[in-house]
Amino acid sequence: MTPRTVFFVSDSTGITAETFGNAILAQFDIEPRRVRMPFIDSEDKAHQVVRQINHTAQQEANRPIVFTTLVDMPVLKVIQQGCKGMLLDMFGTFVRPLEDELGMKSHHRVGRFSDISQNKEYHDRIEAINFSLAHDDGQTHDDLAGADVILVGVSRSGKTPTSLYLAMQHGLKAANYPLIPEDFERKQLPSALLPFRSKIFGLTISPQRLSEIRSERRPGSRYASLDNCRAEVHEAEAMMRRSGIRWLSSTTKSIEEIATTILQEIRPERLSY
Amino acid sequence: MTPRTVFFVSDSTGITAETFGNAILAQFDIEPRRVRMPFIDSEDKAHQVVRQINHTAQQEANRPIVFTTLVDMPVLKVIQQGCKGMLLDMFGTFVRPLEDELGMKSHHRVGRFSDISQNKEYHDRIEAINFSLAHDDGQTHDDLAGADVILVGVSRSGKTPTSLYLAMQHGLKAANYPLIPEDFERKQLPSALLPFRSKIFGLTISPQRLSEIRSERRPGSRYASLDNCRAEVHEAEAMMRRSGIRWLSSTTKSIEEIATTILQEIRPERLSY
């Protein structure tokens, strides 16, 4: 396949340009070279970007594809006028029709975060990350009333990465507790969790997959054996069913998919939407 | 202000639609109600979406704004034909010109992750999260050779959330180590880190901001006092300068901005671009 380069050009971190650009590129059978160009916040830097893109255009048979989320008009103009790549102006394309619809001008302002230390939403998100870390793997029962979501499931069913994702992406305080043999013997959820049933969500996983994951950590152990995984999963699912909590299987799901489902089911109050 | 509702409609998690849609909305002085509609993967579900959007359109003076990343054409058609909102079709807008440019048809395939358990990139990302958690706050010196990035800085300078973000967003194994009085006395970086200087990155922070952050945790403590914060930051910056490592101030920066800068500076080998 002839080489093709994709540039992501942004005045800020470029995360929006990348998230969106990569989602679109995933619709095609190509494996382009990718170049991230963040913090392009002056006309000088824009000229450098143009030089780099045009240099690539000269070297490769295909013209580069350029995803941009630039909002600063003079900076964007430099790219529009000089760049020999295929320019996909993600903001301009939608901002202009929205200006008409909303009957107002857009800010053309760079970045959500000018001074993060003054931003309440950001502060709460960092707090949520700290909360989720402190409440990882049942480390503490403190302030469970402050949790937005409490995940339960057997060890290695996906609770930790899902909790951290809920905190980082959605600013939710997500605690997680492993279900262990003692819980199965008592045939009920850990007693500290019982008052918070409405925000408990269970994760299960197929015994085969669980055994694979555990074997990476502790190969040949009883912990990782298929027999033991089967027994633990069976007990955990029976308990979740008995407790009337909502749960799903993480076997083939990404943490993004699990998190989205949890939001739909639990609908935490803190969630802005 | 008259109410306005924004819908995010996706066949998958809707994260792309939200990230992009919210970045565009941030360009306007509006505070719309937001409704997330993920997993719209059938014509039936699309009809339900249309009913909900049109119900909102009837109730509010303004027509709803609908960001969609639907790739399944029959599902998208249901929305296009029935929806009384302002439809911003984020994929269609860019996929069609790209089909021409690339000379190929797009997949119109839903989601990056069909079965996540088989996906190497996803597996590595979860491994990176586990690594970063295990190497948080200097918990272990094991396998530092396997780290992509090693963050250092005084306690509460932003190392932990940045490490977790690097792991979650970029799949990087990010360890982090606090700089403590013992290091300042010895006047050098923790010795276990010295062989890995090229992947060490420092975070500093203004003493005032540090004192604020620490005071939330331990109000009135010596740890949080401005005097102590001033001394620690002074020592840490002197050490980073002497060691010749790269560093930045996290005082007014988000973890996204810090992470993006680190990627630009360290350029970890694992990084795909």
Image (tube, coloured by chain):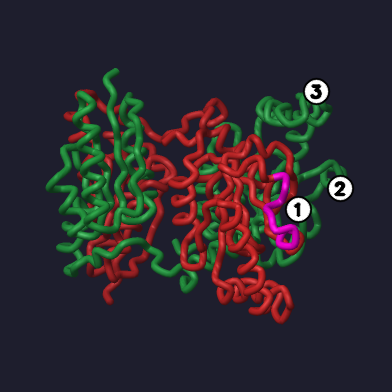
Chain colours: A green, B red
Q: Is residue B273 left or right of residue B76?
A: right
* Lower sequence index among marks 3 and 2: 2
Residue receiving disc 1:
A138
Mark 1 and mark 3 in contact? Answer it, CB < 8 Å. Answer: no
Residue that extends furthest to the bottom in the rendered view of this protein: B220
Q: Residues within 10 Å of mark 2 (few under 14, many from 20)?
A: few
Q: Is residue B143 left or right of residue A8?
A: right
Residue ID at (47%, 61%): B254
Residue that extends furthest to the left in the rendered view of this protein: A81
Q: Is residue B55 left or right of residue A96?
A: right
Residue ID at (63%, 58%): A199
Q: CA distance from mark 2 to mark 1?
A: 17 Å
Q: Residues within 10 Å of mark 1 (few under 14, many from 20)?
A: some
Residue receiving disc 2:
A186
Write the start and end of the magenta stretch as one range. B183-192
* Lower sequence index among marks 2 and 1: 1
- Nearer the observer, A164 or A109: A109
> Tag 3: residue type?
Gly
Please identify the quarter of the rendering in which residue B103 is found. Answer: top left
> Tag 2: residue type?
Arg
* Local secondary structure at mark 1: helix
Mark in the foreground, 3 or 2? 3
